[in-house]
Amino acid sequence: MKAKNVKKIIIFLSIFIELIQAFLLHAQPSEPTGRRLRTIVEEKFSDQSVIIGATTGSWAFGTYTGEIMDREFSYVTPENDFKQWRIHPDPGTWNAVEPDKWVQHIVDNNQVLRMHCPISPQCSNWAKNDARTAEELETNMREFLKAVCERYNGKSGFEYMDVVNETIVNGKWHHNKPGLDWECPWYKIGVDSDNNQTPLYIKMAFEIAQQYAPDIKLIYNHHGSLSRMDDWQLIAETVNYLRNLGLRVDGIGWQAHIDNGWATPENLNRLRMIIDRAHNNNLEFHITEASVWLRNGVSETLFDEQAATYRAILEVLLEKRSTGKVGWNTWHIDDGHGWKTEYYPSLFDADYTAKPAYYSIQEALENVVPSKVIEPEKKTLIKTFKLDQNYPNPFNPITEIKFVLKKSGHISLVIYNLLGEKIETLLDGYCQADEYSTRWNGYGMPGGIYIYRLQGEYFSETKKMILMQ
C-alpha cells in the first residue's frame, strides 16, 4: 500500500475516533431505574395535594441539567431569572429576556412555575447603595413588582410567587446595612405602628401582588433554622397582620438548606409543628429550597446518610398532605451546576447519574398509598361559608354584618383597626350551620376604615368597612 494511502487512512481513522469520542461525551446520560418522579406524583397525587419540583435557570434549556428537570419534575422554580437584580437592576434598566423564556417552556413541558422574584436581599446593587432614600427605594420596588405581576399574571402555568423572602434574621427584622452586604435595603422605607413594627415594604409588596397578580398564589418565604421558633412566631403574627389588613397570603415557604444528618426526631417534630400551624391557618406549606450539604467530603456512607436525610423530611411532608397542600422543591439538580456544588447537595452527580438521594425521593413517593380526595372537610368549609359586606357602609354608628355557615364549627368574628389592633370580638364560639346576623356599634370610636374578620378552623375572610363620625 502506498504511503499516501496509508496517510489518508490514518487521518480518516483519527477523525472517526474523534467523532466517536464526541458522541460518547455528549450522549444522553442514562435514566435512573424505576419510574420518573413526575410520573409517580401525577399518579399518586392527582388531587394536587403534593407537588415535587426543582430549580435551575433558563441557561439550562437544551443542556443535560435542563433535560433532567423536564424529565423528572412538573413543578419548576427559576433560580435567578425573576430576581430584581436581573429584571430591573436600576431605575433605567429593564430585562425580560431570561424570564420570558420560561413562558413557552413550561407550556411545552406541562409544568407549573413558582416565580422566585421576592422583595428581599436578592435585589440590585443600586438598591443597596447607602445613598438611596426611602422614597427612591419605594418607587423602585413598586415599579419592579408591579411590572412583573402585570407581565406574568394569567400566563399558563404561573401558579406561585414568592412575594417576600428572608425578612427575619434571628428573631428580628432583616434591615439595611452599610455598604453592599447581605442586607434588606427595603427596611429603610419605614415601619408600621403595630406591636411588631412590621416593615412597610412587606405590606406594600403584598398589596401590589394582590392587585396585579390576582391569579397567582402568594408565598411568604423564609430562610432560617427551625430551631429559631421566634422567627416562625413573628412570621405567623405577620401573616395575621397582613390578613387583618384584607391582604391575601396563600402559603408559607421554608428554605431548607441543612447539613447532612439534620433529620433528628426533634427537628422533624419542629417541622411538623410548622406545617400544622400553616395548615390550621389555611396556608399551603412549601419547602422551597431543599439542600442537604455534605461538608466533610464524599463517601458511599455519606451519600447514603444524605439520602436518608432527604427522605425523612419528604416523608413528613407526605404525612401532612391530608391536612393541606405541601410542596417540595430541590434547589439543585446536578452537582456540576448551581449554588455551593462543593457540598454535593444534588440528586444527580456531576456526570448526571442519579445519586442515592434521588432514589430515596423516588422510594418515598412510591410507598405512598394514592389518596382519594384530600381534606374533604376543609374544602367543604371553604366552599360553604359566605361573609357579606356590612350594611350600611359607610355607617354611623351601627352597622349589620351577616354571614352563612353550612357546616357547624368554632367561629370567631372580630373587629380590627388598620394597625391590626383588636377592637372588639363580636362572636367567639361554636356555631351550628345556619344564617347569622350581628351588629357592631362604633359609638365613641374615631371615624375611618375598620376591618372585620370571620374565621373558622379551615377558613378566614376579611372585609373593610367605613365608620363616619
Image (cartoon, rainbow, N blue to C red):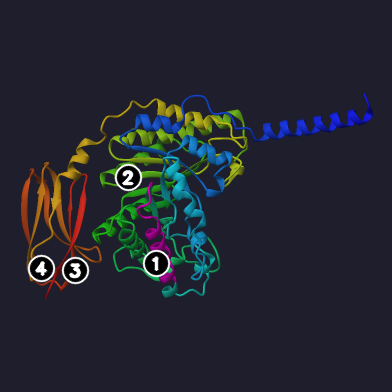
- The amino acid on which the numbered mark 2 sits, given as a three-letter code, is Glu
Q: CA distance from mark 3 to mark 4?
A: 11 Å
- Whether residue 19 can be seen here: yes
Going 46% across and 63% down the picture, which residue do you hit?
184
Q: Which mark is residue 449?
A: 3
Q: Is residue 20 magenta?
A: no
- The amino acid on which the numbered mark 1 sits, given as a three-letter code, is Arg
The residue identified by callout 2 is: 284
Q: Quadrant of the C terminus?
A: bottom left
Going 32% across and 40% down the picture, which residue do you hit?
325
Choose between 289 and 143: the one closer to the eye.
Answer: 143
The residue identified by callout 1 is: 142
Q: Residues within 10 Å of mark 4 (few under 14, many from 20)?
A: some
Q: Earlier in the sequence, mark 3 or mark 4?
A: 4
Q: CA distance from mark 4 to mark 1?
A: 35 Å
Q: Is residue 150 magenta?
A: yes
Choose between 422 and 254: the one closer to the eye.
Answer: 254
Q: Secondary structure at mark 1?
A: helix
Q: Which residues are magenta?
A: 137-157
Going 30% across and 56% down the picture, which residue do you hit?
214
Residue 454 placement, left or right of 66: left
Q: Is residue 371 above or below residue 112?
A: above
Instruction: Indicate the position of residue 255 as horizontal and vertical percent values.
Output: 45, 47
Q: CA distance from mark 3 to mark 2?
A: 29 Å
Q: CA distance from mark 3 to mark 1?
A: 24 Å
Q: Earlier in the sequence, mark 2 or mark 1?
A: 1
Depth check, mark 4 against mark 1: the one in front is 1
Q: Which mark is residue 442?
A: 4
Q: Residues within 10 Å of mark 2 (few under 14, many from 20)?
A: many
Depth check, mark 2 against mark 4: the one in front is 2
Q: Secondary structure at mark 2?
A: strand
